[in-house]
Image (spheres, coloured by chain):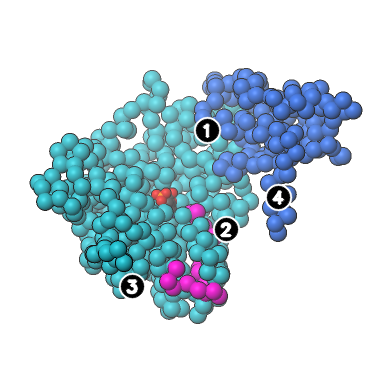
Chain colours: A cyan, B blue
Amino acid sequence: MFDVMTVRADFPILERETRPGVPLVYLDSAASSQKPYQVIEAMDDYYRRYHSNVHRGIHELSEAATFAYEGARVRVARFINAPESDQVIYVRNATEGINLVAYSWGRSNIGAGDEILLTEMEHHANLVPWQILAEEKGATIRYLPFNENGTLDLAALPALLTERTKVFSFTAMSNVFGTVTPLRTLIDAAHSAGAIAVVDAAQCVAHLPVDVQELNCDFLVFSGHKMCGPTGIGILYGRRSLLEAMPPFLGGGDMIRRVTLEGSSWNDLPWKFEAGTPSIADAIGLGVAVDYLTGLGMEAVHEHEQFIVNYALEALSEVEGVRLLGPPATQRGGVAAFTLSGIHPHDIAQILDEEGIAIRAGHHCAMPLHQKLQIPASARASFYMYTTIEEVDKLVEGLARTKRIFRT
Amino acid sequence: MSSDLYREQIIDLYENPLNFGELDPCDFSYEEDNPLCGDVVRLDVRLDSNRRIADVRWRGEGCAISQASASLLTEEIKGMTLEEVKAFSKERLLELIGVPLSMARVKCALLSLKVLKAGAYGIPSPGEMRGEDD
Ligand SMILES: Cc1ncc(COP(=O)(O)O)c(C=O)c1O
């Protein structure tokens, strides 16, 4: 049985006060989630007991480190139901995963006149790497628009996916609207146009069950730090045939089979894409994070967030002057972005901070989305499995106080 | 309900800004935004025959700190020479604002000063530079 207070007890940081007598109300998990002690202790244990380099030593410590590092990969592969763990590549974060695809796959498969399809609600991580690629290759980027309520305009999709479209890359869950996008529909549409489908699952994997085989996506990326894991580690999942055909992204140690002064040959998957000493402790931490999530059950995590976001949307909509961005609770994850009339989001966040409430204010790395809405910025509260109703109440009280200070 | 940062003065200036508007013609004009926050400030400055600031107007959008800072700065620099404007220190503006600012908010507070100095040094506005490229 899912119990939020039991879950909270796993997260040491949630006990802290931001100032004496002011407990932390952490409503910024979409930017980065907090970590359960299991993850923190596993990383600590690695550094205390068996830190050494991986794949390089014959000695006891290196064996243990390699075993833990590769074991984490297997756990992540199971978590997203990858057919085999060598299709799970360690990167630094979702951003690096998309860059890897854009540089390695993109540079060998995109040419002048080709088209790249994105959506208007992407995070900069899923915009800028493609813009760099398009500029370099003379390709064109098209954007699937979003509707006023923050859902994708699917009616516009057929006209945007043409025989020139080589790749369709889109978010599985908007980090501003919270919108959960219809993945199967988008992936199937890409395939029927002959394009590959890249899924930015940075938000989604942390909050919803994901099965890459059922989705039938070609690439999928996410970051460990948004899903109870550490920073510095992320995942690129890829279809085997594509990964095998791709040239390396970075060159160096670990990614080679043989090096001579005349040239080199590449290592097998996944190491072909993992040049240099990796983030070993972080990979181990991520393995423990996915175990933690599996232990709670992603369905249960999702259900709790639905409960919270439902409550939050209702409570926020009763605050005079609040404009909520995005779709109804049933179509979104645990994210509630809004504006408050006459008060800049930065001021909102600052006043909430005085009460220990952490939210995000700004454009949340989605400037084009805000430009289309014609707002310079928004405030965003985001929730996770440890968020309580009482915390949402504090947010709403904090907004009332903000309005009093600003006399609105 | 007290808030260190949002003293009456800041909120008053946010609601009733000083020197808000435009000057046409003016001797220099500069605009810059702080894309991270969505703050934007534009300054128009008119000089007298001694190259002192005869009048200054600003307009913009953004958080209370960036907007209050623009009011305070424009009020302070009237009558100054260009050289004095160029030497106007960050510390002096922060002192005028007079509330404790976190690192993230210092940028908001200093946007108007950045705009003023860029204008005083005759740097073309980022907008205009982009315009020339197009
Ligand atoms: C939808 C989405 N994509 C990509 C990213 C980038 O994640 P990271 O900064 O960990 O690479 C984020 C994180 O903010 C996100 O929300």
- The subunit letter for the residue under badge 3 reads A
Residue B82 against residue A294 in the figure, above or below: above
Q: Chain of mark 1?
A: B
Of pointers 2 and 3, the one earlier in the residue sequence: 2
Looking at the picture, which amino acid does disc 2 mark?
A: Glu
Q: Which mark is residue B129?
A: 4
Magenta stretch: includes residue B63? no
The quarter of the displayed image where residue A41 is located = top left
Query: Which is in the foreground here, disc 4 or disc 2?
Result: 4
The residue to which callout 2 is attached is A148
Question: Which residue is disc 1 drawn over?
Answer: B104
- If you read the primary sequence from the N terminus, does the residue marked by circle 4 or circle 1 appear first? 1
Q: Amino acid at mark 1?
A: Ala
* 4 or 1: mark nearer the eye: 4
Of B27 and A208, the residue lying toward us? B27
Q: Which chain hosts label 4?
A: B
Numbered circle sitting on residue A156: none
Three-letter amino acid code at disc 3?
Answer: Ala
Residue visible at 61% across and 55% down in the picture: A372
Side of B32 where A164 appears, left or right: left
Which residues are drawn in magenta?
A107-124
| Label 2, residues with CA under 10 Å away: few <14, some 14-19, many ≥20 | few
Task: Say whether residue A112 is magenta.
Answer: yes
Mark seen at residue A245: 3
